[in-house]
Amino acid sequence: MREEIINCKNQALAQIMSSSDSNELEGIRIAYLGKSGKLTSLIKGIKDVPEEDRGQIGILINQAKNTVIEEIANKKNSLSISSRKWFDPTIPGIKPKVGHLHLVTSAIREISDVFEKIGFVRVRYPEVEWDYYAFGGLNFPVNHPARDDWETFFVDTIENSKYGPMLLTPHTSSGQLREMERAKPPIRMINIAKCYRRQSDVSHTQMFHQFEGLVIDKGISIVNLKGTLDYFAKNFFGNNRVARIRPYHFQFTEPSFEVDISCDICQGKGCRLCKEGWLEIGGAGMVHPTVLKNGGIDPNKYSGFAFGWGVERVLMMKSGLNIADLRLLYSTDLRFLKQF
Amino acid sequence: MDILIPDGWLREFLKTNATNKEVAKYLSLCGPSIEKTSKTENGDIYSIEVTTNRMDTASVYGIAREASAILPRFKKNAKLVNLEQKSSYKFVSKVKYLNSDINSKLCPRFTAVLIKNVMLAESPKILKERLTQSGIRPINNIVDISNYIMCELGQPVHTFDYDKINNHLMILRESNKDEKITTLDDQSYILSGGDIVIEDGTGKLIDLCGIMGGKLSAVSETTKNVLLFVQNYNPAYIRKTSMKLAKRSEAASLFEKGIDSEQVKTGILRAIDMFVKLTKGIPEKEILDLYPYPYKEKTLKIGLDEITNKLGIEISKKDISDILNPLGLILSWQKNTLKVSIPSFRSMDINIPEDIIEEVARIYGYHNLPSVLMPGVIPDKPNSLPFTFEDKIKNILKGYGGCEVYTLSLVSKNNTFEGSLRLNNPLGPESEYLRTTLIYSLKEAAMENSGEKEPFHFFEMANVYIPKTNNLPDEKMTLAGIFANTKFREAKGIIESLLNELNIKAEFIQEELKDFIPGQRIAIKSGGKEIGELGNLENGNLIYYEFDTARLKSLSQDFVKYISITQYPPQIEDVTISFPEKTKIGEVIKLITDNSKLITNIELKDIYKDNYTFTIWYQDPTKNLTDREVAEIRNKIIQSVKAKFGGQEH
């Protein structure tokens, strides 16, 4: 048996040595290692070997088998390229059909991810709203310009005796009172929704998206607003970015702020794209006590902050996309949509 | 509102050692935002954004006052130079030279004075330079004085040719419908009523108040006697008129935001001084001043703890006083309570204690406050939020090669169903209605890409607005999609797979509806209720589907029941059957499956002419099926198909 194994192996090795292409090698593989190959039959015969020799014979056959496999592989590798089985690694793959999510969807996902990690609850409130939630309840005086026909869309329907005219919400701030009506403090809301304003030019679309943050709890201060803004700046735009706030004016916050994010192009030194190293992102402020009262929350016990920014704006700031006409974002041109 | 402030002019009222760069930087951090500093040969010009609540800063003097409070916080010297005024005039409610009837609801404070024997001339160089730098073209000394006062104080000033005011009578009132006026710039307007106007003694309109003067009484080269005119108006009226007539002017943009009544007095006194100096005119000693409700100083109280709590830091009483005093606020501490008297120029923006907190915080410097995330309890989430589910659908459709679009929810009358909500003030007829379906928007989207020859699939998830009586519309989050250049079986396969992935069992039932080719619309139902639709659209060779996302969510299962894996493999075979024309293959498949519980799956593998090849899985979870058992089921299938549909096995 021992001799038979060694002969078989040597025979195989001799044939491998003298073979000249991969087809021939495949024939050799089948002749020795195939289902009824010579080595395979020897392995099958192992059961007839006396028990005391079986271990040693087994090892010998295994060694022979491994040597033959190895040599076939070595020989294959040493064959000149022309005699190998033809394979073209440069041929393009057959790709699955690729779909595309809209840029706004991607931006909304990223924004809600950032805020949900620090306990904000994502909500959605009516896009067609009563004046009360969009303006009146947010402390807008009756004659405020935003309530004009020139700025806000009004729906042709009868006014509600309590809530006033029906309109398309011009900002996600209309969700503030809705949230206060839904939940008691502590509140950490992120409201992302469609908004509408009566404007259409290269940097404005009549339909757009905003995200509104609202935090109400005991002892909420400007320091906490700054903390949240810095957290967003770092987690949305990058670790080297910071936020700052400057004085501004809104009806429903007091004090009110304009929020800037440090420019990453010039690292805050000032460049063509920014204003002295800062990029404006949107408004924020401490919730006005009248708004808290309107939401059924005692302003002597609780305080809060809010901010509301354009999804499109932060998307442009983050991606560096240079879309000259923002209206393109809402076009349905495949040549545009397929790029993202 | 953006204003231009020349640095040289600013420094006439602001004595400081701060450089221009420092002025711009520090003001932006703590006060009005300096958007840009432009260099010119006559010095720098600041472009400043003034917020609408702080019209007291919309002037050279106002900015100087802000800077004098802000710069010392940055260790810069800064002193405000007070306005010089000669006060040898009397303010009276009746004068000999002018009869008037003024509606104080429209005009809270009305002042005017007659200046005789003015000499029209060119203005001095420095005055012209400053106006030019402020973006205003110098014209002559009379016009320039008005503009100069407006830039310096934020108070618009107007002048009439006194001799052109018939009967020296002015009636200030609301305009009537269809009244006509021609303004200084030769533009004629037919008013729609409700504008503030002045008529003279003959009933002619001589002023479109707060917007622009009338041509009839305009100052010209022959003017000898001038009526100098300084007022404030009800801001809402001014804005309405300005927007209605699409007539913007510097004066209008100041008046429409509201002007301090006390400042009117400062304005007319400064203007008289300039007239005397530049036109050699002789003013009357009595100034007409109609001011029935003078400003009463208001006071606010606030606790030290309120300030420190909102700021989030400790701050001393002395620091607070040092911050507020330079702003012109009058303070007194009673223990830890601060009493603040508000001067008239801040009466419009300081109304509640929080406004005082704002003043302390911004001058202290928001940039000096630390930045700390709030501690505290994380709120509970409401049950069953839709967002994860909506995202899942979008991901699935993207995976199938769909391309997401966002189309405008405002559509034309033709692009929505009857009874949709209409806007009162749309931008145009193509965006007049709130859509109740996405079908027309997506059809349009597909048509826009008619040049595309490859198959494509658009989908959108957006609210549609279903009207309700006496209430806000129902905002229904709708999933819709459209296929172009696509075979119906491929489109249907995507919808079937979507429902599969969402673990929704649904039936497809042929039901007709408008917009679809007759007989080629499928209602997709679950538990007898329609959850969506799919079908071939009339004209355009497009396939459309629409689902109510909330309904999908309520039917969808996150997890399915686990079925233990049987050790007995299925027997799988292909069976080819030919059918007569117009056989519904879906019904054939249902019949085949109904033949035996042991048929665990069936797929339509191939169609060739009228031959349909099905792959059928036979499997018994308890044992291996024998060839004979399979043959029995197969025979049953063949017989039933032949009996019901006339199908012949191949």
Image (cartoon, grey):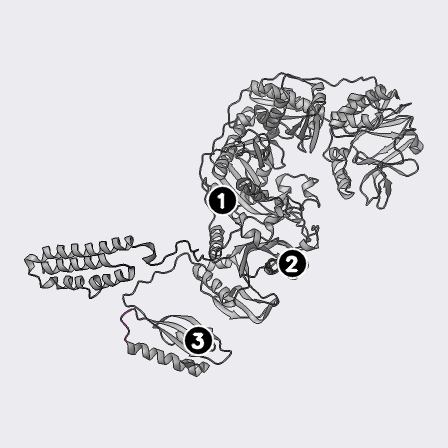
CA gap, disc 2 to disc 1? 34 Å
* Residue on which the image places disc 2: B420
Q: Nearer the viewer, residue B371 or A253?
A: B371
Q: Quadrant of residue B558?
A: bottom left
Residue B419 makes an appearance in the image: no
Kind of element beneath mark 2? loop
Residue B352: give x, y in percent of width and height: 62, 30
Labelled pair 1, 3 in contact (Cβ < 8 Å): no
Asked if the magenta segment contains residue B623, the reply would be yes
Q: Quadrant of residue B546?
A: bottom right
**Mark 3 vs mark 2: same chain?**
yes
CA gap, disc 3 to disc 2? 46 Å
Residue A42: give x, y in percent of width and height: 14, 62
Q: Nearer the viewer, mark 1 or mark 3?
A: 3
Determine whether B551 is above or below B64 in the image. Answer: below
Residue A45: give x, y in percent of width and height: 12, 64
Asked if the magenta segment contains residue B493, the reply would be no
* Residue on which the image places disc 3: B612
Q: Amino acid at mark 3?
A: Tyr
Which region of the structure is painted magenta?
A: B620-626
Circle number at residue A110: 1
Kind of element beneath mark 1? helix
Kind of element beneath mark 3? strand
Q: Nearer the viewer, mark 3 or mark 2?
A: 3
Residue A160 makes an appearance in the image: yes
Residue at mark 2: chain: B
N-terminal-most mark, 3 or 2: 2
Q: Amino acid at mark 1?
A: Glu
Q: Residues within 10 Å of mark 3 (few under 14, many from 20)?
A: many
Q: Amino acid at mark 2?
A: Ser
